[in-house]
Image (cartoon, rainbow, N blue to C red):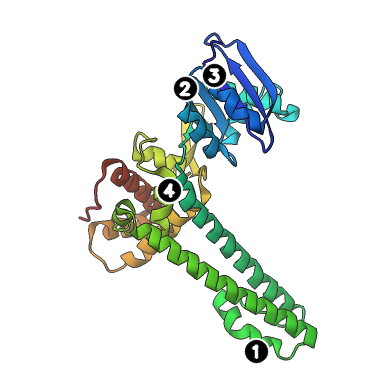
Amino acid sequence: MNIVFVGIDLAKNVFALHGVDDAGKARLVRPAVRRDQLVETIAKLPPCTIGMEACSGAHHWARQFIAFGHTVRLMAPQFVVPYRMSGKRGKNDKADAAAICEAVQRPNMRFVPVKTELAQARLAVHTVRQGLVAGRTATINRLRGVLSEFGQVMPLKAKTVRLEAATRAEGLPQWAQTACMDLLAEIRRLDEQIDAYDQHIRLMAQADDRSKRLMGMPGIGPTTASALLAAIGNGHDFDNGRQVAAWLGLVPGQYSSGGKNRLGHITKAGDSYLRTLLILGARAVLAAANGKNDRISRWAQALAERRGYWKAVVAIAAKNARMAWAMLAKGEAFKPA
């Protein structure tokens, strides 16, 4: 079979395949391939370009297919939707596989880098930590909610809730006290787990020279450094730092009509976790810039005065993303002026 492009709609147990030749004619249409048949089916194909949506399991399958000599391209699901012939209302696995096959052929399509097992293992630590932090926030809010039912309105600050909740619960009915104390115990347990995962992340960052170089930048700590390394590796999937900033959604959206160009808010595309880490680091840089006389601090302060706080924060985050790419792609260390 003269197949040059294949689209695969991933699932847990049954996969859909759609392959075309160099003329765009369908040569492989398999709407129901069982999980235990997928590897064998792909292994029998001549070397071709395989497209998949960057969803659960995509990186695992990509690594397997690359081992068979195929070129694998992963795409964000929202970039595939416009190529579905039946539109948004006609979604099915067969149509999705055909849409993926069509999308992977587009010359301007933005692809997601295929991650190594080590990179995925590092990201798994970050993902679990994210879940623990979200669980802790939800538990603190639940505790505040219980107390508010009895007229004890707590401040939003989590530290205050930890310090005062037990005292506020003393005058409550017995069962309400029990609920509050159990929630406080759960918050303490989550605090311990989050501290343990912070230590895991510090160890990961210290064990890799690339992470240690990234931590030399203002606003980049162990968490951001290890997440950046896991997400973009050596940066070879990007041509320049601007592409990394755009991939992370740290560039303004463009609205053009009638020959007039207008830049709007940042696109917020890509990895929201990594973007959030860079934004938090940028806020720390701006907070620490007051009174300093180095080049970056002067630039950050001048930008905040000229364009406002939040635009300065986004600009610092985007600059850090670009510099991180340069350091990873070129193997350079941070050079403060």
Q: Residue 240: percent from the left, percent from the top? A: 34, 37
Of circles 3 and 4, the one toward us is: 3
Q: Is residue 212 visible?
A: yes
Q: Earlier in the sequence, mark 3 or mark 4?
A: 3
Label 3 and label 1: CA atoms lie apart by 68 Å
Asked whether disc 3 touches disc 4, contact meaning CB atoms under 8 Å apart, the reply is no
Of circles 2 and 4, the one toward us is: 4
Of circles 3 and 1, the one toward us is: 3
In the orientation shown, which residue stands out farthest toward the bottom?
A: 171
Residue for badge 2: 107
Q: Earlier in the sequence, mark 1 or mark 4?
A: 1
Q: Residue 241: percent from the left, percent from the top? A: 35, 40
Q: Residue 260: percent from the left, percent from the top? A: 47, 31
Residue lying at 57% horizontally and 84% vertically, measured from the top left: 163
Q: Amino acid at mark 1?
A: Thr
Residue for badge 3: 45
Asked whether disc 1 touches disc 2, contact meaning CB atoms under 8 Å apart, the reply is no
Q: Earlier in the sequence, mark 3 or mark 2?
A: 3
Residue lying at 43% horizontally and 48% vertically, measured from the top left: 230
Determine whether the residue tagged by mark 2 lies in a helix, strand or loop.
loop
Determine whether the residue tagged by mark 1 lies in a helix, strand or loop.
helix
Q: Amino acid at mark 3?
A: Leu
Residue lying at 67% horizontally and 21% vertically, measured from the top left: 30
Residue 230: image tag: 4
Asked whether disc 3 touches disc 2, contact meaning CB atoms under 8 Å apart, the reply is no
Residue lying at 55% horizontally and 20% vertically, measured from the top left: 44
Quadrant location of residue 116? top left
In the orientation shown, which residue stands out farthest toward the left?
A: 337
Q: Earlier in the sequence, mark 2 or mark 4?
A: 2
Residue for badge 1: 167
Judge whether 306 appears above or below 10 on screen.
Answer: below
Report crowding for label 3: few under 14, some 14 to 19, many 20 or more residues within 10 A (C-alpha): some
